[in-house]
Image (spheres, rainbow, N blue to C red):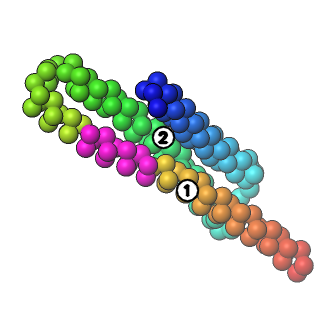
Amino acid sequence: MSTERQLEVYRQHRNAQEKYIYFLLAAVGAAIAFAVNQTLGAKLSWSQLPLAFAVVLWALSFYFGCRYLGFVESTLLMNAELLKVSYGQHSLTGTNPQLIAAAVKIVEEKIDSKSKLASWFARAQFTCLLLGAVCYLGWHVYEMWLRTIHTTI
């Protein structure tokens, strides 16, 4: 596979990842707005506790998604610095082979570490979104049950 083709595949993959994360961020924002809209004018009660958990989980999902994007941006910047170092164009290493080898190793370790953190945040974002949905559905069913028992009494 040519280098140009590899770069294009990488770009397409990166673009798809980014769209997915932004989709999840939008879904979480919409879910929070929907939950707030559904409780307009409602009085606080213990029965809304599952809804509160859902909103907290959705807020965490949003936070984790933002953190993911921050780590991805940082990793991309480090990759750019790695290229400079590798080609002997970085001001700190110049063309010194020993300095380049040491810097490459350090930067690659940092990239690996940040990539792992980014992956964790992406999984946490999705997990919190789903758990929030489960809490929301639990709240909805519980509210329906409460209305049912109050009308049959």
Mark 1: which secondary structure? helix
**Residue 149 shown left or right of residue 53 in the figure:** right
| Magenta range | 108-120
Marks counted in the figure total 2
Tell me the residue that label 1 is attached to: 128
Whether 133 is drawn above or below 28: the answer is: below
Residue 37 x %, y %: 73, 47
The percent coordinates of residue 36 (x first, y second) are 69, 48
Q: CA distance from mark 1 to mark 2?
A: 13 Å
Residue 135 placement (x, y as % from top left): 64, 63
Question: Which image quadrant: the C terminus?
Answer: bottom right
Q: Is residue 140 left or right of residue 85?
A: right
Considering the numbered disc 2 on the image, is that residue within a helix, a strand or a loop? helix
Q: Earlier in the sequence, mark 1 or mark 2?
A: 2
From the viewer's perspective, tell me whether residue 80 is left or right of residue 8: left
Q: Amino acid at mark 2?
A: Cys
Name, please, the residue furthest toward the right: 152
Q: Residue at x 69, y 67 (%)?
A: 138
Q: Quadrant of residue 2?
A: top left
Residue 32 belongs to the span the image colors magenta: no
Name the residue type under label 1.
Answer: Cys
Per the rendering, the mark at residue 60 is: none
Residue 66 or 49: which is nearer the viewer? Answer: 66
Q: Is residue 90 visible?
A: no
Instruction: Check the image and report above or below for 1 versus 150.
Output: above
Q: Main secondary structure of the magenta part?
A: helix
Q: Circle 2 is placed at which residue position?
A: 66
